[in-house]
Image (cartoon, rainbow, N blue to C red):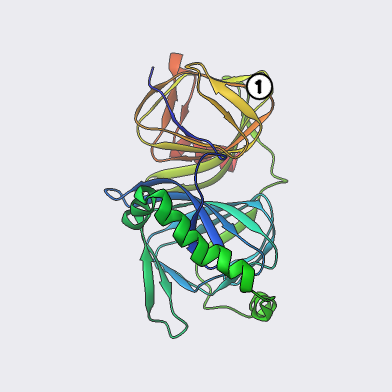
Amino acid sequence: MDRPIVMTSDKTPWSALAPGIEMQIFHAEPATGIWTTKIWMHAGSVLPPHRHDGASEFFILQGEGVHQESGPFEVGTYAFEPEGVLHSPVPAVDDIVLYMTSYGPGTFLKPNGKELYVADAEYFSKQLAMSALGRRTKHFMLIRIWSLFRKRNQNVDKLAQSDGMESYDNFMVPTENRAYKSIEALPGVGFKPMNILSSPSVWSATLRIEKGQSLPGRRNTNLCEYLVVKGSGQYATGEAFQHGDYFREVEGTYGSIVAAEEVVLFVTNHGSTRFLEELWCAGPEQMAKLAEG
């Protein structure tokens, strides 16, 4: 059996992204342009205006607020942002934590619309390779000094009430009250499909494993990423995980996952997963049928 890569929440370093905004970088692959992070916006911070030069999606783990182009959000909200959209500054009235995967660059913009800098897979891979001293220095400049000298940013509340930029085909959907769709061949396992993309070929969902139940062994055709939203569990090969951790599987065959307590995972699958013994195949087509059912 192949073994997953597990990045625990308590040991994965936080890196500064912008004043008052930190990130845990889980994955950055310049060859494909894919990058995955957990972003923590401290209360009073503002994410600069930006352009999505690649599609992205995110899932709210903590906090609530208003995204000018998409509407209000809360814990459990899922959002998809297509390639090419422009977004207004995003204010954080309170702490906000979100999990995000992007399929191309994001360009931060100055107030006059000119480029500030590009955040892409290459940028994030360099951040991953940064020395501990370099990371601490950047953190001190963008987080520590910001927190020491900040005053309540009066613009945050104004931004939260502004009209924002032109609306696009991005969407934001609260999902906490959606029901999990059960799979007869996978007892104790349920899915909430979030989105299915054709280009790139990706599907995302929240996956629940009931306490004492397991996600059977499976074979992936491509990269599959998981963020632990709730609970704890362990692979048959011994890798353990708990709330807040990230793990990923590349193309290959993986052992079962047993839930020590109820487990909820946010899953981004860049292909399809076929469960061993031909139990079921989880691919874009199957996810679309679940979403319709």
Residue found farthest to the left:
31
165 on left or right of 197? right
Q: Secondary structure at mark 1?
A: loop
* Quadrant, the C terminus: top right
Residue 231 placement: quadrant: top right
Q: Residues within 10 Å of mark 1 (few under 14, many from 20)?
A: some
- Residue at left 37%, top 76%? 115
Residue 91 in picture, x, y percent from top left: 62, 70
- Residue at left 58%, top 69%? 146
Residue found farthest to the right:
177
From the viewer's perspective, is residue 164 above or below residue 189? below
- Residue at left 37%, top 32%? 250
Which of the pair 35/284 is nearer the observer? 35
* Residue 45 appearing in the image: no
| Residue under label 1 | 260
Residue 83 in picture, x, y percent from top left: 40, 63
